[in-house]
Image (tube, helix red, strand yellow):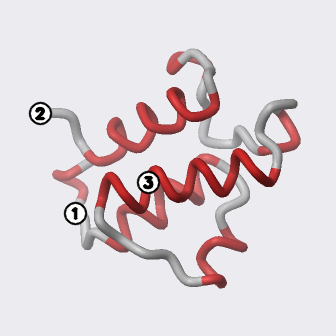
Amino acid sequence: MPGLRDQVLDIISAVLDIDRQSITESLSPQDLENWDSTQHVVLLLAIEDEFDVTFTDEEILRMDNIAAIVAAVLERKGATSGDL
């Protein structure tokens, strides 16, 4: 069973239509032409739906790269290092 981090990265790969292997922790909307504000909303809605979570406006504003998105999901799900 994939860990939470892997599940998040799979969603990011699918929504942004990028190869999973090209996703880095520092990847951000500035790095991808197709990661615009609309795709960002689509991405976050897909993550919220998959993990049955709802992010606050403040959390969404902090999600400016892959590391921040993964961290927000892990925090929302109360994940431990064993869940990664």
Q: What element carries label 3?
A: helix
Q: Please state which amino acid type lies under the numbered disc 2.
A: Met
The residue under the point 62% across, 20% down is: 18
Q: Where is residue 48 in the image (x, y as percent from the top left)?
A: 42, 62
- What separation in Å lies between label 3 and label 2 (alpha carbons)? 18 Å
Residue 62, compared with residue 27, is above or below; it is below
Task: Identify residue for label 1.
Answer: 80
Q: Please state which amino acid type lies under the numbered disc 3.
A: Ile
Task: Identify residue for label 2.
Answer: 1
Q: Please state which amino acid type lies under the numbered disc 1.
A: Thr
Q: Earlier in the sequence, mark 3 or mark 1?
A: 3
Residue 25, compared with residue 60, is above or below; it is above
The residue under the point 12% across, 33% down is: 1
Quarter of the image where one finds residue 29: top right
Q: What element carries label 1?
A: loop
Mark on residue 47? Answer: 3
- What separation in Å lies between label 3 and label 1 (alpha carbons)? 18 Å
Q: Position of residue 27 (x, y in %)?
A: 71, 38
Determine crowd level at label 1: few under 14, some 14-19, many 20+ residues with C-alpha closer than 10 A: few
